[in-house]
């Protein structure tokens, strides 16, 4: 029995020796615990430690790479993994878990260099970052995410997205949210793969558990960073500066600033020509400074504004919001036939800079399956080439992406149906 006890103790001590220090407490107020011990300023936080706050509790942890992990009242969370490799940032692994309540995560230096290896789990969703400062609310059934700076990518658990995974879940069901989308949230309910974009602050993390007045503020004008407002939090500023941290000697990170500041470029679309006696719905020449895409009957404008910035990674699936199409006959005596766009699918894989789309074009008793895939430029233009050299194409597509209205897209399409008929139209998409 004594030998068995010694063996058990040895295993426990070995496990403790291998647990890495993930960070240190820089502020604790009210009821707060670390691994069921009362939290105190300067206390270390080890990988795997359960962090908890009571009804009046606030806990600020400075991570080993100068990031922040903040728990607000009635919250339980865990720093599952915080492994930093200063020699090879690609080996850095960071995983946080919010069990319930409201928490805020601000990426540290190492995370910014290994964003592909960062994961923030809730009971129902996986969150990845683009060098980001964000807040999350969760209970066992619902999670909501708001972004202060940078961008996040969110997906519900299911399919290839597992709670046991590392890094962001990226696929057709994942959604991105950027700091430029002020006042908007991504919400995931249990069993829901694709997050829902919500407008307004109702149910936002800051509404459900407001920050203290001394909580570090996101620095305006620097989407990849967070700063302390010294007018409100001089003592916290000093604590952050005084706490030692693991040095991260690496090249400067590429700052992922999200969409450019200022009004985003809007998409406008319509038919510039008269068809079957129906008057045009859009001008041939658009607003001043607008980019124009035009075919034989339809037009798209992307209004003037900051240049579109293509995300580096992730995938977005769009929903069909509007369309207009006709089937034209080479015989001028045969009138153009109105057609409907149904069962539309459109997605963009930002990592591959590629798009895929399909829909059913229905005219009278006929249905034509329309498909296309092609490339997306860094400026948010997408098309397949005129010879349709991609494998899955039977129509010509030319379109644009926009950051406005939470993300939108539009494209013109044309297809030769047979020797005498041609389909032509325009589609508008949002997510």
Image (cartoon, rainbow, N blue to C red):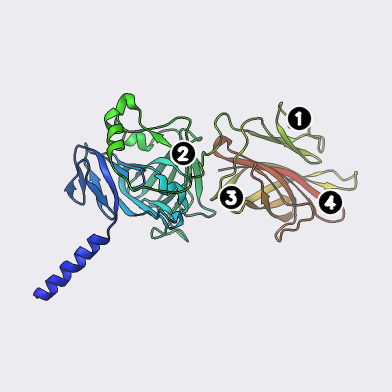
Viewport quadrant of the N terminus: bottom left
| SS of the residue under disc 2 | loop
Q: Which numbered disc flags the more N-terminal residue, 2 or 3?
A: 2
| SS of the residue under disc 1 | loop
Q: Does the rendering let one see residue 164?
A: yes
Viewer-nearest of discs 4 and 2: 2
Q: Which numbered disc flags the more N-terminal residue, 3 or 4?
A: 3
Q: Nearer the viewer, residue 420 or 244?
A: 244
| SS of the residue under disc 3 | loop
Find disc 1 in the rendering and name its residue: 283
Res 421 label: 4
Q: Nearer the viewer, residue 193 or 331?
A: 193
| SS of the residue under disc 4 | strand
CA separation in Å, label 4 and label 2? 52 Å
- CB within 8 Å, label 3 to label 4: no
Viewer-nearest of discs 1 and 4: 1
Of all residues shown, which one is farthest toward the top? 231
Find disc 2 in the rendering and name its residue: 224
Q: Which numbered disc flags the more N-terminal residue, 1 or 4?
A: 1
Q: Give the class, few, some or many, for how many residues have Cα within 10 Å of label 2's Cα (few <14, many ≥20).
A: many
* 172 horizontally vs 235: left or right: right
Q: Which numbered disc flags the more N-terminal residue, 4 or 2?
A: 2
Q: Residue at x 51, y 35 (%)?
A: 180
Res 350 label: 3
Q: Which numbered disc flags the more N-terminal residue, 1 or 2?
A: 2
């Amino acid at each position: 029995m004594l030998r068995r006890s010694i063996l058990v103790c040895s295993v426990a001590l070995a496990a403790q020796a291998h647990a890495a220090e993930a960070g240190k407490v820089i502020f604790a107020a009210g009821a707060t615990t670390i691994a069921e011990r009362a939290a105190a300023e300067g206390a270390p936080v080890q990988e795997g430690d359960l962090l908890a706050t009571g009804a009046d509790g606030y806990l600020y942890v400075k991570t080993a790479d100068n990031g922040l992990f903040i728990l607000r009242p009635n919250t339980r969370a865990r720093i599952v993994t915080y492994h930093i490799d200063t020699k090879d940032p690609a080996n850095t692994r960071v995983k946080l878990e919010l069990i319930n309540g409201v928490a805020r995560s601000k990426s540290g230096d190492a995370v910014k260099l290994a964003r592909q290896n960062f994961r923030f789990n809730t009971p129902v969703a996986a969150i990845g970052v683009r060098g980001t400062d964000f807040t999350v609310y969760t209970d066992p059934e619902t999670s909501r995410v708001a972004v202060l700076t940078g961008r996040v990518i969110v997906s519900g658990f299911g399919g290839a997205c597992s709670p046991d995974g590392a890094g962001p879940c990226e696929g057709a069901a994942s959604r991105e949210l950027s700091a430029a989308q002020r006042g908007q949230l991504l919400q995931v309910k249990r069993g829901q793969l694709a997050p829902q974009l919500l407008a307004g602050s109702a149910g936002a993390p800051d509404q459900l558990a407001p920050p203290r007045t001394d909580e570090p503020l996101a620095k305006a004008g620097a989407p990849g960073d967070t700063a302390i407002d010294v007018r409100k939090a001089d003592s916290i500023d000093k604590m952050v500066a005084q706490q030692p941290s693991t040095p991260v000697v690496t090249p400067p990170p590429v700052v992922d600033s999200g969409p450019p500041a200022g009004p985003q470029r809007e998409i406008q679309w319509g038919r510039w020509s008269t068809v079957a006696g129906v008057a045009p719905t859009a001008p041939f020449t658009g607003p001043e400074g607008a980019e124009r895409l035009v075919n034989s009957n339809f037009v798209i404008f992307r209004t003037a504004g900051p240049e579109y910035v293509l995300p580096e990674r992730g995938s977005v699936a769009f929903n069909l919001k509007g369309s207009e199409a006709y089937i034209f006959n080479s015989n001028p005596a045969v009138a153009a036939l109105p057609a409907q766009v149904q069962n539309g699918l459109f997605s963009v894989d930002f990592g591959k800079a590629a798009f895929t789309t399909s829909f059913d074009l229905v005219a009278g008793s006929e249905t034509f399956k329309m498909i296309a895939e092609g490339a997306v430029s860094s400026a948010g233009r997408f098309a397949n080439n005129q010879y349709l050299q991609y494998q899955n194409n039977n129509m010509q597509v030319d379109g644009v992406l926009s950051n406005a209205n939470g993300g939108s897209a539009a494209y013109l399409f044309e297809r030769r149906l047979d020797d005498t008929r041609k389909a032509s139209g325009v589609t508008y998409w949002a997510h």
